[in-house]
Image (spheres, grey):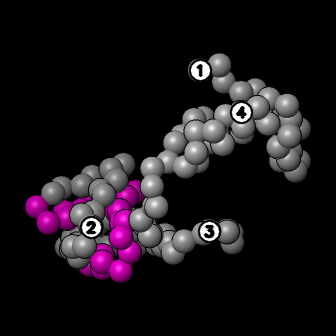
Amino acid sequence: APTTHFSPIFYVGAELTSGAGLTVSTEHAERAVYVADGSVTIGDRAVVVGDLAVLAAGVAAGVVAGADGAKLMLLGGAAMDGPRHIWWNFVSSSKERIEKAKADWKEGRFAKVPGDPEFIPLPDR
């Protein structure tokens, strides 16, 4: 489904047969490879199903499928402009904005999900 994003990103599925390879270019600053099925090697590193390999910045990465092939997600984009803070379902570059989001959630100021009347309370932690 189409989504709104505020910086250059990529999210690509790839399926490799046994021994096949691809190169993840340096076009984007932040890059990673998620192995959904099978296994790969990236340089001398073995990456197996369920692993996310974060790639070194500025270095093209060769990815080679293992004996059973591999299904991958290649993802990444522009580097963030600073640190992000995460609390429950809220992510922001500002801790104050997260506190405001908590208050807004408690007071029901977020839009409801169409077709889903359930309200999930804010966690205590």
In the picture as drawn, the residue positioned furthest to the left comes out as: 44
Say which of 32 and 4 sits in front: 4
Question: Magenta residues, as a range?
Answer: 23-44
Q: Tell me if 104 is positioned left or right of 31 in this view.
A: right
Q: Secondary structure under badge 2?
A: loop
Residue under numbered circle 2: 57
Task: Residue at 26% x, 78% y: name it.
Answer: 23
> From mark 2 to mark 1, how far is it between C-alphas?
35 Å
Residue type of the residue flagged with mark 2 = Ala
Say which of 33 and 70 sits in front: 33
| Magenta region includes residue 43 | yes
Which label number is shown at residue 5?
A: 3
Q: Secondary structure under badge 1?
A: loop
Residue type of the residue flagged with mark 4 = Lys
Check if mark 1's residue and mark 3's residue have beta carbons within 8 Å: no
In terms of sequence position, does the residue under pointer 2 or pointer 3 come before the other? 3
Residue type of the residue flagged with mark 1 = Arg
Residue 1 % position (x, y): 69, 69
In terms of sequence position, does the residue under pointer 2 or pointer 1 come before the other? 2
| Magenta region includes residue 30 | yes
Q: Residues within 10 Å of mark 2 (few under 14, many from 20)?
A: some
Check if mark 4's residue and mark 3's residue have beta carbons within 8 Å: no
Any part of residue 24 in sight: yes
Residue 29 % position (x, y): 36, 70
Task: Residue at 33% x, 50% y: name it.
Answer: 51
Which label number is shown at residue 102?
A: 4
> From mark 4 to mark 1, how far is it between C-alphas?
12 Å
Most common secondary structure along the magenta stretch: strand
Residue under numbered circle 1: 125
